[in-house]
Image (cartoon, rainbow, N blue to C red):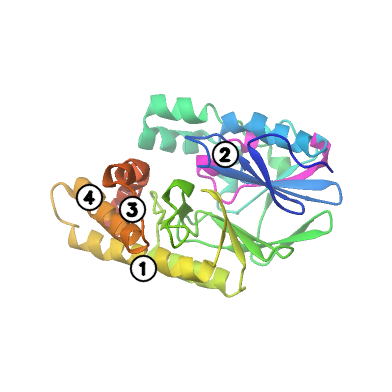
Amino acid sequence: MSTPTAEFCQRLSDGLYVIDTGFVRPRFDAAFLVVDEGRAAYIDTGPNNAVPRLLAALQSIGLERSAVDYVIPTHVHLDHAGGVGLLMSELPNAKMLIHPRGARHLVDPSALMEGVRAVYGIEAADRDYGELVPVPEDRVMTSAEGMVVNVGKRPLRFMDTPGHARHHHCIWDEATRGWFTGDTFGIVYPELHTPNGPYIVPATAPVQFDQDALHESVGRLLAERPELMYLTHFGAVAHPEQLAVQFLSQVDEMVVTARSLALVSDRHEQLKRAFAGIYIAELRRSGSTQPESFLHAMLANDLELNAQGLGAWLNKH
């Protein structure tokens, strides 16, 4: 097979490619393409607008659309799964393989779309995600803890990983000793790399953040002794044990801070300010010399979503 020529598709290793979906900005949102023995699977898709890129990447490595056996969203948040239905409509042999808690939301995406419009507003949701295409029930498979499927002869194993969302699974690739982590292992923006390497931003978007479950999920991922983590935001990162310490320590500090602000009148704004302080302090400890204005701009969306997520968590507790 030829190496992809599309500028948005990068070969990570034999039979593994990362596709920049083009969502939000370059190198923000990824889909992964796993290939072996002439068969293929996508892991995460980005939104509807990403589908032409996903299909172009497949073509650029010399595969027909009929070669795709699986489309595997890590969870149903639309930056990961918004394009699943539209992509499936172009792939005659593919099955969607999804966490059992998420399947109904992509078979009938109306409630999912309503929730996204409530969070982002109707205009932004329609612009960024479009109209979700339902996935036919007879093309749906659900994952289970320890389940293995083969792409060609390459095994992919599933782990139930709540914490970011209850409908989240991660996928183990034995060939590279790496996990496809969706948002369970946080977010790494290339623009925020420091002299000490990648910096992980916690991902606590509404409405299913669970601190204890997240710690347990990350611990179970690390127990496999992975060499790499494949993050939807964005790409492959090494030294996962080191990054996990940075990630979870920030999550724990966010929870302590949220509890301290539980009863203040302007809680949401105070959460955003406090979380910005946590993240920027960690970036400075890691050697970042980026201007504070740049860091605030890069983190603005995460501050908003994470404050919403911890606000929803406080309301439950």
The answer to which image quadrant residue 155 occupies is bottom right
Indicate the secondary structure of the residue bearing disc 1.
helix
Task: Between label 3 and label 1, give the one nearer the viewer.
Answer: 3
Distance, label 4 to label 3, CA atoms, is 20 Å
Residue of label 2: 46
Residue at 58% across, 44% down: 30
Q: Residue 125's x, y, as percent? A: 44, 30
In the rendered structure, the answer to whether residue 118 lies left or right of residue 235 reads: left
Question: Residue farthest to the left?
Answer: 265
Q: Residue 180's x, y, as percent? A: 61, 56
Give yes or no for contact between labels 4 and 1 (Cβ–Cβ under 8 Å): no
Residue 249: assigned label: 1
Residue 315 appears anywhere in the view = no
Residue 289: assigned label: 3
Residue of label 4: 273
Image: magenta residue range: 65-85
Q: Is residue 73 magenta?
A: yes
First in residue order: circle 3 vs circle 1: 1
Q: Is residue 278 magenta?
A: no
